Image: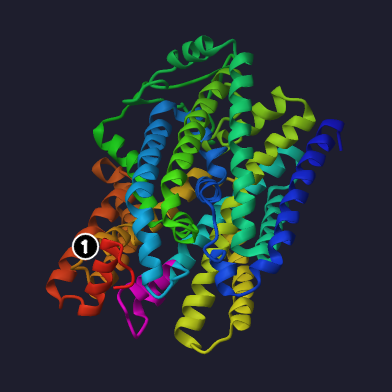
Amino acid sequence: MPGNTTQILIAMVLYMAVVIFIGVFYAKRANKNSEAYFLGGRSLGPWLTAMSAEASDMSGWLLMGLPGVAYWCGLADAAWTAIGLAVGTYVNWLIVSKRLRRYSVRANNSITLPDFFSNRFREKKKLILGISAAFILVFFTVYAASCFVTCGKLFSTLFDLDYRWMMILGAVFVLLYTLLGGFLAESASDFMQAIVMIVALSVIVIIGTVSAGGIGAVLDNAQNIPGFLEFFGLASPELNEAGQQIVVDGVPQFGAAADYGLLSVFSMMAWGLGYFGMPQVLLRFMAIRKEGELKRSRRIAMVWVVISLAVAVFIGIVGRQLFPTEHLTASAAENIFITLATSSLPAILAGFVMAGILAATISSSDSYLLIAASAFSKNIFQGIFKKKATDKQVMWVSRITLLVLALIGIVIALDEDSVIFNIVSFAWAGFGATFGPLMLFSLFWKRINKAGAIAGMVSGAGMVFLWKLVLNPLGGVFAIYELLPAFLFSSLCIVVASLLTAPPSKEIEEDFEAVRTGNLDA
């Protein structure tokens, strides 16, 4: 193994050792009972809540997927996505966090999202519980697969080894870590990983900009590519029959800029709607120790999000200046962060920056696997099939579920040509449309009932699949991001189904009023 590669490996191993230590440190507390394992006993402080929420949310796509989009087709798609995410983050913290923290306590001290929805409507047959848990299993398995793809691309690019084996190695590490420490370990390591991620992004964008000759040189290069530096235009790489960008005399070829109208803008900004249904973020709202600390958490989260998203987009633009012909497919473009780091930093420092990608991946995949496992073990196994199951049995079922989900995620991630951004966008749309409208209506509309909740989940998830697989390939108006139409359709179905069926019971309405007024003892 070359010396530089060895140093990178040493730095990454040191980082992973710290992560494992955190898992061991929290293992005893995490395994105390299921509430401690899945929600940390509602003990998170404001810094831990904010940083772990954003780190688990952003995942490896922040360091690979988003820069890759900017590198491949320019500013518009990446920038409008980032703007939508920033707005969605703020609104979610502003209007959802406080009421959800309060409502989850009122709703029989709910510790998972399916628990909350089921208890919110005081259901006895647990239909909402089962449906919501099933959708969590489906979409988080896809999400975990995107993280495994990130691991595979990272290690195969760095060490020139087979993608599939490197992907499996990363998946095994994530699985072992998640089995060990549960929610507290996940949140504590996410705090550290959020710091690593933002430092890694900032270091690379500064060094890359200097190496490229300054901001002026980077922008001049970008302006010479049709549509690359426009908010209402899109660069169009010219491809050969093999699907690779054509290069002539060392210059990558681009066609005329593609149109980018308001429909495209709304489509990409619709990413922000996803936050209202993201379990990994919503659980942090439920887990914070005091409702009053959420305001401080919101400020911390917004600073981190705005800086990280802006820097990630600019890294792609800097990379196009420094390495114009290095990555000739959309999938390969997602390696631009790795290329910048390994070419501009001493090997040992590059290793720690690479740990930023690993940090992002771990912080997300452990969240996804843990929440999915809790959906099955706590909500389906104990909530439906074996209501008298002990905490020990729930924990064992959870660990078995983690293993099964990891294996399915590995199978999905076997294709090394997978584009991380595309995988994440589908899972994001799934959660946003399935749970986003339901969450908002559950917290803020007194008239919503069980029928509306079920209609909203099923219609939202169904529309995501229909739009993505059937309508989107038709192009034109159907080419928009599936989250936007699915979110609107789910909202419509919630309202119609609720109004056409009996209103909620008096007890449910009393719960709503108690949460609205803050009088939880009423």
The segment highlighted magenta reads 113-132
Horizontally, residue 195 falls left or right of residue 232, namely right
Horizontally, residue 280 falls left or right of residue 319, namely left
Q: Where, quadrant-wise, is the C terminus in this rendering?
A: bottom left
Q: Quarter of the image holding residue 235?
A: top left
Vertical order, 222 against 516 (above or below): above
Residue matched to label 1: 445
Q: Residue at x 70, y 59 (%)?
A: 23
Q: Nearer the viewer, residue 332 or 30?
A: 30
Kindly report the secondary structure that dominates the magenta region of the rendered protein: helix
Q: Secondary structure at mark 1?
A: loop
The image position of residue 72, as x and y in percent, is 49, 30
The image position of residue 295, as x and y in percent, is 41, 46
Residue 415 in sight in this render: no
Q: Where, quadrant-wise, is the N terminus in this rendering?
A: top right
Residue 449 in sight in this render: yes
Q: Is residue 238 magenta?
A: no
The image position of residue 249, as x and y in percent, is 59, 14
Q: Residue at x 56, y 11 (%)?
A: 214
